[in-house]
Image (tube, rainbow, N blue to C red):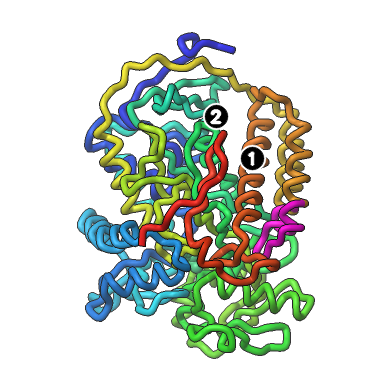
Amino acid sequence: MAHATSIEIKEFDTIIVGSGLAGLTAAYHASKNGNVAIITKSQLDISNSYYAQGGIAAVTAPEDSFESHIQDTMVAGRELCDRDAVEILVSEGQKCVQELISLGMEFDKENGEFVLGLEGGHTHRRILHAGGDATGKGLTCFMLKKVQEQKNIQVFEYTTVVELLVEGQLCVGVQAFDFVTGNNVIFKSKATIIATGGLSRIYDRSTNPHTATGDGIALAYHAGAKLSDIEFIQFHPSALYIPGEEAFLISEAVRGEGAWLLNQEGERFMQHIHPLAELAPRDVVAYAIYNQLQLHHADFVYLSLKHLNPESIKKRFSTIYNTLLKYHIDFTSDLLPISPAAHYMVGGIQTDLHGETNIAGLFACGEVASTGVMGANRLASNSLLECLVFGKRAAEKATQRKSTGVTLPEINDIRVDTGNENLFLETKNRIATLMSKKAGIVRSEEKLGEAIAELNSIKKQLPEIINEYNLLKIKHIVDICTLICESALIRKESRGGHIREDFQKENPELCAHLIQQKGHPYKFEEVRK
Ligand code: SIN
């Protein structure tokens, strides 16, 4: 053990952990009222947001309305959305988008009008995009530039947070490890905002960057933060399927432009399942594909664009088109093999409407947070919007916090033993296979029980006190996967992104948020209707 005073201490008004769109947005707004540190475990420009293709949902068309966007969000969320949070998302979302545009952000236009895309679950064209299918890149690069222009934002790359420092019920900063110097560093702050993104890399097939393993949510859980609804994992219906290759995302916007899903017999199957056919909410489409794969003992279905205008597809989806050419696939004329892949953590660290958690001084925004807007299944392209709205809200509340003057807790120095790197990778892959088989799109009591037993046995092999980074990462993944399996076991129903083969219907009695908190029994909390 080392006392906090024996290692370097840096002090900021606000600390942001993570550098996706939520983190950058929070940093930009927090910098209006104090100095800010952004801590990111890799480079500033590596995040889930960067890879978002579809776009950002916002009401801009005259024939569209707030109520319609609110309804679409609530319908997709299967009665688990908090209405007040959704109203804020939609109404403030429009303002945030206008604010971005006034700062210089350019969304795609034709003849002076926004080109609006359509995606699953939306009843109006309302998805703004930039650079065709490179919206995430466009938005994060734009916000990155804004952040870099602010003199009072300092960025710490290749620095990972290993613990949130909580004294009593107050978060006073974080302990971090700097990979470049090999030093432990304490960042002291009035407020800490977690914006570390999701965890979909805990599954075999995922559209997320390799860094998305849920460390932010594990840190918050161990600090005593409440987690909400983490059994809901969104599987994106259409990710490229080529054995041995990454599950490259094929944006839902491609189906929005009319692409069809075909089974192994070459037949469309979605029209028989949902009135919106290929544009049904994501949970419905992913489950329908899962059923087709079982029925035909296949690993993939097809996406077909053969009936669409090739030139407009190439223009609108140039990133996807060019990436697929590397695999010798021209998706305007070839059938494209796709299957679902883990894409988004729907639940997360529970926050109020200002991004604050149950721990004073600790905030969360973006995918890692559960603000109440996503319900049991996120509506497509609402995530970038949530980053803007709740990133700003969290920053505004966080910067109102006053200095506490508390003493820092004792810390446990972390070191890196490269000899444990292989163990980490092997264990991570073993867990990803386990989660995909036992806690994937379709779950059951039996499968979840088996997953928990295996996770427990992995955990037993870990030392009680961990001061090595690779072992700590294993522990975090094991803990988070166990929590997901436990909540999936408790939720004895099928709803949104959580499907149980042994409880195939929604149970109205379980129309509530499932809360987990370290040292407390789980509980259900009412949805704000
Ligand atoms: C997509 O383009 O299909 C993904 C966008 C999102 O996850 O909302």
First along the sequence among labels 1 and 2: 2
**Callout 1 amino acid:** Asp
**What percent of the width, then of the height, locates residue 461?**
78, 32
Residue 460 sits in which quadrant?
A: top right
**Callout 2 amino acid:** Val
Residue bearing mark 2: 162
**What percent of the width, then of the height, locates residue 74?**
40, 68
Q: Residues within 10 Å of mark 2 (few under 14, many from 20)?
A: many
Residue located 47% across and 74% down the image: 120
Residue located 26% across and 26% down the image: 402
Residue 492 versus residue 24 in the image, above or below: below
Marks 1, 2: nearer the viewer: 1
Query: In the rendered structure, which segment of residues is drawn in magenta?
Result: 434-449
Ligand 1: does it lie within 8 Å of the C-beta at label 1? no
Mark 1 element type: helix
Instruction: Indicate whether residue 140 is drawn in magenta.
Output: no
Residue bearing mark 1: 479
Residue located 33% across and 53% down the image: 388
Quadrant location of the C terminus in the rendered image: bottom left
